[in-house]
Image (cartoon, helix red, strand yellow):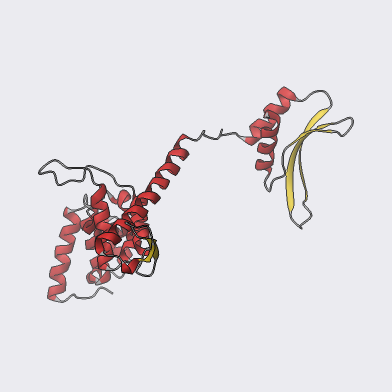
Amino acid sequence: MPEQLEPHQKARMTALETTVRDGLRDFRRTGQALSEIRDNEFFRAGYDSFESYLQDRWGFTPPQAGRLMEAADVAKVLDPLGIQPRNEAQARTFKAAAKLVTELEPEDQRVVARLVEGVMPPQAEGDDSPPWDLPAAEVRIMASVVKRLDADATVYHPENGREVAMGTLSGPERYEVIRTHVDQKTQAYREKQEAKANAPQAENVNWGDWILNYAAQNLGPGQRLELVVEPDGSGASRAVARVVDGNTGEVLAAGQGAVTLKKAALNLAAEVRG
């Protein structure tokens, strides 16, 4: 049954609902307000559950509200780093990075903020909005490097190249080591992404249509295309697609064995195409 709220709780609930109503276009304010309503159970004044409150009061499903609250939590972590996601969906791409940041000591979080600042392009005077989109993966790289290179880590001294413990370096030296590691890993990540973007796209082949078309256009008299499932000797089965001479039983072409009929057919397609 609904419960009565204390006067101060009722006042806070009113303020939070005003925030939700006025800030539906601002996922940060909306998500934070919903989290506080849930955590303090302010909804109990009129509803038996948070879920029924969400649906009846705001038309939110629990998953929708969950995404808003999660995005608001992520944005709260990113704000001290100088990162301001433009919307809820973008904020949630930083979830893994934000988790790593929260695992760092405050001093190390400030190092991540400095790394972020170091890659920001110049902004016009008076322009407070971030004109850039720093990939979430690159923030994750920054946080993971800072976390990994703790005081006990063995690194190369930035000036003389000798192996030393990270904890023996001065603040500027430690930052230079971290920045170098971040630059190397970020460059490797970017090269990998570029290679992936430039890689030829695999042809989207409907294997059933390919079998029928190939049979109609390429099989000679007495030939047939078979999809055979047979034991592989280990107690499992494998599928093989092959072209067979129906008169002699000779296998004219065969793809590699596979664990699915689709893959077997595509393997045969690759084989006959050369």
Q: Is residue 65 left or right of residue 236?
A: left
Quarter of the picture containing the C terminus is: top right
Residue 121 drawn above or below residue 76: above
Q: Give residue 65's quadrant in the image.
A: bottom left
Horizontal placement of 209 versus 55: left or right?
A: right
Q: Can residue 138 be seen in this view?
A: yes
Look at 16% across and 73% down and name the residue there.
9
Q: Which of 15 and 147 is in front in this view?
A: 147
Q: What residue lies at 24% left-to-right and 56% top-to-bottom?
A: 114
Compared to residue 244, the image places residue 83 above or below, namely below
- The answer, for residue 64, to whether it is visible in the render is no
Q: Outermost residue toward the front?
A: 160
Picture coordinates of residue 59, whole percent (x, y): 29, 55
| Residue 80, horizontal then vertical, whole percent | 21, 59
Q: Give how far across and how far down residue 10 sits, in percent.
A: 15, 71
Closer to us: 42 or 23: 23
Q: In this view, does 168 lie above or below 66?
A: below
Q: Which quarter of the rendered picture does the N terminus lie within?
A: bottom left
Q: How many labels does the image show?
A: 0
Residue 68: image location, x then y, percent: 29, 56
Quarter occupied by residue 124: top left
Q: Quadrant of residue 171?
A: bottom left
The residue nearer to you, when weighing 182 against 160, is: 160
The image shows residue 122, relative to residue 114, as above or below, that is: above
Identified at 69% across, 41% down, the residue is 264
The residue positioned 46% from the left and 34% from the top of the image is: 198
Residue at the outermost left position: 126
Among all residues in the image, which is located at the extreme right? 248
- Front one among 120 and 99: 120
